[in-house]
Amino acid sequence: MIPKLEPIVAAKTFVTTRFPHCRAALLAGSVVRGEATETSDLDIVIFDDTLVSSFRESFIESGWRIELFAHNLTSYRTFFEQDCRRAIPSLPRMVAEGMVMKDTDVIENIKREARALLDSGPEAWADETIEMKRYFLTDVLDDLIGCTSRAEGLFIASTLATLVCEFILRTNRQWMGSSKWTYRALDRYDTHAARELVAALERYYQTNEPDALIRYVDETLSPFGGRLFAGFSRGKSNET
């Protein structure tokens, strides 16, 4: 068994060994936020102007799982833009929150870019997008209402939770997340809404009673016109 070094020591050792000539390096993720668990890894972002392009790679060193995100001094912007377009700002958040382990007078400007993107929020959904998302939510909600299979219901409820979180966050121009970050993003924006959704899910999972979850989705959709099925159309040509 390889002894597990302190996270900062392990991260600095990794950077010094693997990227001794990089321009900057950050330690990000749950360790920096004080939320590390037994299965947490080290998220390390490096900026190296000798790299031709960005890449991601995983390692196990110093007793840690290490996720490396490697960029040169311009390639990171493509990932900033891609993350912001999908409204899940993974790299901007890592850079903004990351602990500086090495710097040659480049990291503050990159951090400033990341913070500016995070502060601006994602682009607002167009009315057409909101309509489409209402339709998708209605479709999954109908699946839950008509579900007679416990096994299928578990998956339907999970899908519904993800979609309703997305709807709440994006209609309020809030950043989203995936997996555990789906809940964290909602909780950060509206703790009451997050807890109410969890309670509705718990009730369904424990008792197979969907009413609270159905009501939650309906209340979310209500300000935007409620459920949508009849009249929804996409791709239809107006030509006669």
Image (tube, helix red, strand yellow):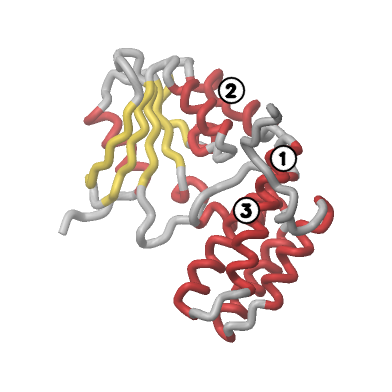
Query: Which quarter of the figure is the C terminus placed in?
Result: top right
Of the residues shown, which amino acid type is indicated by label 3?
A: Phe
Q: Is residue 23 left or right of residue 166?
A: left
Viewer-side residue, 188 vs 26: 188
Q: Residue at x 75, y 58 (%)?
A: 227
| Name of the residue lying farthest toward the bottom | 207
- Looking at the image, is mark 1 or mark 3 nearer the viewer? 3
Provide the residue designation for mark 2.
113
Label 1, residues with CA under 10 Å away: few <14, some 14-19, many ≥20:
some
Residue 145, compared with residue 96, is above or below; it is below
Answer with the quarter of the image where residue 4 lies. bottom left
Q: Is residue 93 left or right of residue 45?
A: right
Cα separation, mark 2 vs mark 3, equals 34 Å
Label 3, residues with CA under 10 Å away: few <14, some 14-19, many ≥20:
some
Provide the residue designation for mark 1.
173
Cα separation, mark 1 vs mark 2, equals 19 Å
Viewer-side residue, 3 vs 77: 77
Earlier-in-chain disc, 2 versus 3? 2
- Looking at the image, is mark 1 or mark 2 nearer the viewer? 1
Under tag 2, what secondary structure? helix
Q: Residue at x 46, y 45 (%)?
A: 29
Q: Residue at x 33, y 36 (%)?
A: 68
Q: Position of residue 200 (x, y in %)?
A: 66, 73
**How many numbered badges does the structure rendering display?**
3
Provide the residue designation for mark 3.
136
Cα separation, mark 1 vs mark 3, equals 19 Å
Query: Contact, CB < 8 Å: mark 1 with mark 3?
Result: no
Answer with the quarter of the image where residue 184 lies. bottom right
The answer to whether any part of residue 119 appears in the image is no
